[in-house]
Amino acid sequence: MNYLLRATLRLALVATVAIAGYFGWQWWLAQQPAPLPEGIVFGNGRIEAVQVDISTKYAGRVEKVLAREGDLVERGQLLVQMDTLELQATLAQAKAQFAEAEQAITQAEAVLLERDSQLQLAKRDLERAAKLLPQRAISQEEYDQKKSQREVASASLAAAKASVNTARRSADASKAAVNRIEVQIADAQLKAPTKGRVLYRLAEEGEVVSAGGKVLTLMDLSDIYMEIFLPAKQATQLSIGADARIVLDVAPGYAGVAKVTFVSPEAQFTPKQVETQEERDKLMFRVKIQVPQEQVVKHIEKIKSGIRGVAYVKIDDTVDWPEQLDRLFPDDLSQMHFDR
């Protein structure tokens, strides 16, 4: 009797486990996405963006940092102001030297006019003396004196012209010095080269940084993408501009529109031997999937680098996207459910 009871219990337990396993298997199958149609391939990756360092061109002290980590900044926005007190003093000195150089030009030009007048007078005196000499109205000595005066006046004019040229070159050099210092002062204002988000704040106000020292790092929001790797057979069928979809791990029920913008011409990692067809099939090529700028702008506050997901690409343009990849991100992301 006890033996039959134990056998019945064992049989009931096995049946219960089998039924639970069957329904569990059916539930798991129901959770799996529909199989992809021929002509669509996929690869795993993560959202990436180009990082841009905001660096100072010259060594100096950080006066103000006008952005915090996480801030969204626009192209041309002032992010960091370096100290320019010393440069401002140097600029004032350079401007004073330039003003002196301009005054020197004015004086040299006045002397030039005077020397030109003296030469014209000496020429006229010599012409009159040349007419009077044959008439013996003046002596040869007086004529030679007039001739010498003209030559002296001519030499003085040449020297005055040289002085004007020297003064102008000096003024040009002074102006160049002013311009150079003004450029250095402008370079002390570190501005955002593109629209982006501040990732890292690497220096604080009052710190002294060396030439080329980094103060901030931005994520360039004009270049958001995902990189995946595909085997050679699939990569060779891809076209630049091919349609793509990106599904993020945090929102698996939605897909984002994207485009293929790059396929590497060389394998990124390969087996040691590639002589056989089997080994050549293992060659993997890097593919860049670009998020359109209009999508970036629309969801600018939600975009973050490092989010993992899957990118799907078409290697056959005639294939339609399956239902699970045709449910796109809504304009209002607050309507979505994100997995934590």
Image (cartoon, helix red, strand yellow):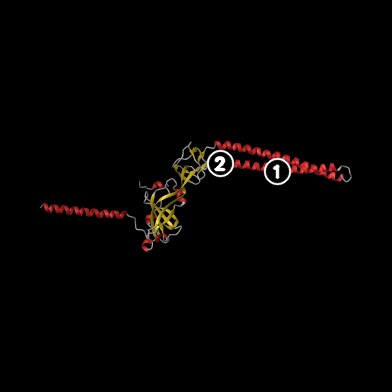
For residue 92, what is the image quadrant?
top right
**Marks 2 and 1 in Cβ contact (< 8 Å):** no
Secondary structure beneath disc 1? Answer: helix
Residue drawn where x is 58% and y is 36% of the image: 89
Please say if 37 is above or below 97: below
Secondary structure beneath disc 2? Answer: helix
Residue drawn where x is 60% and y is 36% of the image: 93
Q: Who is closer to the viewer here, 160 or 206?
A: 160
Question: Badge 1: few (under 14), some or many (20 or more) residues near its Cα, within 10 Å?
Answer: some
Q: Mark 1 points at which residue?
A: 162
Compared across the picture, whether 30 is left or right of 3 comes to: right
Q: Which amino acid does label 2 sit on?
A: Gln
Q: What residue type is labelled 1?
A: Ala
**Rendering coords of residue 208 (x, y %):** 49, 38
Residue drawn where x is 70% and y is 38% of the image: 107
User: Residue farthest to the left?
Assistant: 1
